[in-house]
Structure formats: structure tokens, C-alpha cells
Image (tube, rainbow, N blue to C red):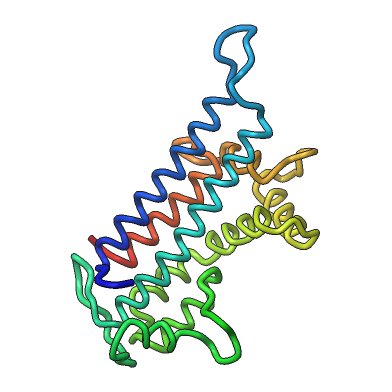
Amino acid sequence: MGQRRLPTVLADFLQNLQECRHLAADAYTWSLPRAQGTRPFITRRRRDSMTELAFFRAFLGWEVFLEESFILYLAGQKPSRGRAPYRYTFPPNQKTAMDWLVPEGRPYARWTHAAEVSDRSERHFRTGGPYARVLRGNRNVLDEARTIRDAIAHWSGSAREKFEKIVRTKLTTLPPGLTVGGFLATTAPGSAPPVSFLEFYVGRIDLAARQIVPS
């Protein structure tokens, strides 16, 4: 991690989110007919694949942001605005901080589950530092985002079943042949202004990151 600072970690993550948004927007635009009677640049299936890639990259960036910011807070850094959280543990360097976060019996610490990160934050920071309140306040959305991420990453019946449960909850029905990318490109019902499900989830992750590392 070197000499990275919290403001840089936040800025890099937000830039990554914007790139993911642009990728999804390009895929949507390229899938539309260029003129009456002409074919679009890409098929709807390719649009869906690009949208899935955009979302997957956004969620992967979220995992990296959580890990990097957590380690830097644990090393004593503070954000551009506000105070550093009160620490219960004082690792001598960032390498040791990373090692301390790995649960016993596991090769690495997981950052995909909001509940796990919240619990981890309470072991290392008073009141869970900047993580517990934000992650618990957004737990349902973050858990849904993780389920969608898993449906993209794993072609398993279990991952697909959990994804379809979200679709039925959000759309009240499961459209035949719906892909993960097709769902993410769909406008979220009741959103004002209207936004796609991709933007709904990415927007909430964006806001959560800004609350964790105020700037």
C-alpha cells in the first residue's frame, strides 16, 4: 500500500465508479439503433455483458476501498474532514495491520459482507469507527449488491436463485430470459429521477464511501 493516503483512496474509488457508469452508459447507447432501419453497434446480449462487467468492477472497487481505508484508519490516518477514529489496536505498520485483520483459519479477510466488516470495525474502533453506522444503515442494499455480484461471478444454481428473488421483489415478476445485465439496465420502479438499477446500487455505494471517508 506504500504511502497512500485516505483522500487518494477515496478519489481513486470514485473515479473507478465513474468509469463503470460510463461503460454501462456506452453499452446502452451502442445497443440502440443508429437511425431508422439500421442495426445498433452491439447486440442487447453484448450490452448486458458490458453492464455486468461495469457492475462487477464497481463492487470489486468497493471491496478494495473498504480494505484500504480500514487499514489506513487502523494505521492512524485521518480523513480530509473530521477526526481519525479512536483505535483499540495499534499495529506498528500497515503490513501488521493487514495481518491482524485476517480471521483465524482463513487465508484472507473478506470485505464483501457488510455485517462482517461492521463486526470487524467494532473490534478495532470505538463505536465501530466510520464503518458500523454506515454499513448497517445500508446493509440491505449492500447485501443485494453482493448477491447481484455473485450472480455475475458464479454460474451456480444457488447464486441464480438468490438473484431471481431480488428481481421478483423489485419488479414483482421475473421476465423470461432476464440476464443480470438486463436487470441492471432496467429503470428502478419509483426512482425519482428515473435511474437504472445499476445506478441505484452504485449511487448508494458512492454515498457510503463518502460517509466513511469524509472529504
Q: Image point 73% across, 40% down: which residue? A: 178
| Residue 189 visible, this angle | no
Tag count: 0
| Residue 129 visible, this angle | yes
Task: Depth check: give the residue in front, 68 or 206.
Answer: 68
- Residue 141 location, x and y as percent? 54, 59
Q: Image point 54% across, 75% down: which residue? A: 110
Q: Is residue 136 left or right of residue 71?
A: right
Q: In this view, does 134 lie to the left or right of 74?
A: right
| Picture quadrant of residue 37 | top right
- Residue 74 location, x and y as percent? 32, 82
Q: Which quarter of the image is occupied by the C terminus?
A: bottom left
Q: Image point 55% across, 71% down: which residue? A: 113
Q: Is residue 76 left or right of residue 54?
A: left
Q: Image point 44% across, 57% down: which residue? A: 205
Task: Depth check: give the residue in front, 132 or 1.
Answer: 1
Farthest residue to the front: give it: 2
